[in-house]
Image (cartoon, rainbow, N blue to C red):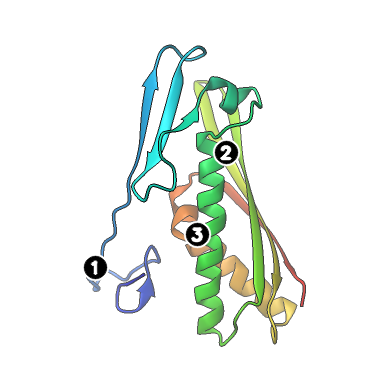
């Protein structure tokens, strides 16, 4: 998706530019009951998730199932990888394969819980890329992907060029 005269959606725009395209996506949650004994279901506009169950145990006790942090991690990994694909293309490079994993950290702090970090781990095969240029482009993608901008957390990146 493009906006801002050819810049990707979510990238910084200069004050004299106007928005060309705006995209809204939605997700929803339904919850019944108390915090520990209640049950919830999450859905996405696309239908990729449709009344997918979640609850206290899936979030805090390691019970299999989804939770908000897992969804944020998936969003961050996918957003970063797409942003890097765009940036690579602008540099005349195309990834043969990129695998990104994001680990989102939820911490209990004074006053409640907070997402404090997202650690991106990337393994990429990009023909014709040298490691220094790859690291520069990956750092640019980390800083400019819309999900990175959304998170008020420390975002780290470990990028490994496999070839």
- Please provide percent x and percent y for residue 66: 55, 35
Q: Which mark is residue 57?
A: none
Residue 161's image quarter? bottom right
- Compare residues 50 and 108 and report the one nearer the observer: 50
Q: State whether residue 153 appears in this view.
A: no
Q: Which residue is mark 3?
A: 79
Q: Earlier in the sequence, mark 2 or mark 3?
A: 3
Q: Which mark is residue 116?
A: 2
Q: State whether residue 40 appears in this view.
A: yes
Q: Secondary structure at mark 2?
A: strand
In whole angstroms, how far apart are the C-alphas of marks 1 and 3? Answer: 20 Å
Q: State whether residue 154 is above or below residue 51.
A: below
Q: Residue at x 40, y 66 (%)?
A: 11
In whole angstroms, how far apart are the C-alphas of marks 2 and 3? Answer: 19 Å
* Label 3: few (<14), some (14–19) or many (≥20) C-alpha neighbours in 10 Å: many
Which part of the image, by quadrant, shows the N terminus?
Answer: bottom left
* Label 2: few (<14), some (14–19) or many (≥20) C-alpha neighbours in 10 Å: some
Which part of the image, by quadrant, shows the C terminus?
Answer: bottom right
Q: Residue at x 53, y 82 (%)?
A: 89
Q: Which residue is mark 1?
A: 19
């Amino acid at each position: 998706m493009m906006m801002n005269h050819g810049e990707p959606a979510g990238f910084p725009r200069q004050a004299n530019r106007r928005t060309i395209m705006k995209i809204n996506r939605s997700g929803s949650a339904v919850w019944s009951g108390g915090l520990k004994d209640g049950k919830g279901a999450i859905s996405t506009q696309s239908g990729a998730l449709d009344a997918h169950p979640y609850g206290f145990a899936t979030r805090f006790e390691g019970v299999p199932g989804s939770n908000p942090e897992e969804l944020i991690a998936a969003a961050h990994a996918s957003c970063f990888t797409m942003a890097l694909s765009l940036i690579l293309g602008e540099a005349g490079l195309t990834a043969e394969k990129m695998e990104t994993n994001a680990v989102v950290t939820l911490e209990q702090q004074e006053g409640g819980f907070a997402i404090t970090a997202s650690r991106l781990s990337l393994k990429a095969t990009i023909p014709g890329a040298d490691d220094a240029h790859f690291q520069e482009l990956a750092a640019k993608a980390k800083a400019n992907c819309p999900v990175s901008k959304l998170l008020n957390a420390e975002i780290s990146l470990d990028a490994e060029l496999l070839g």
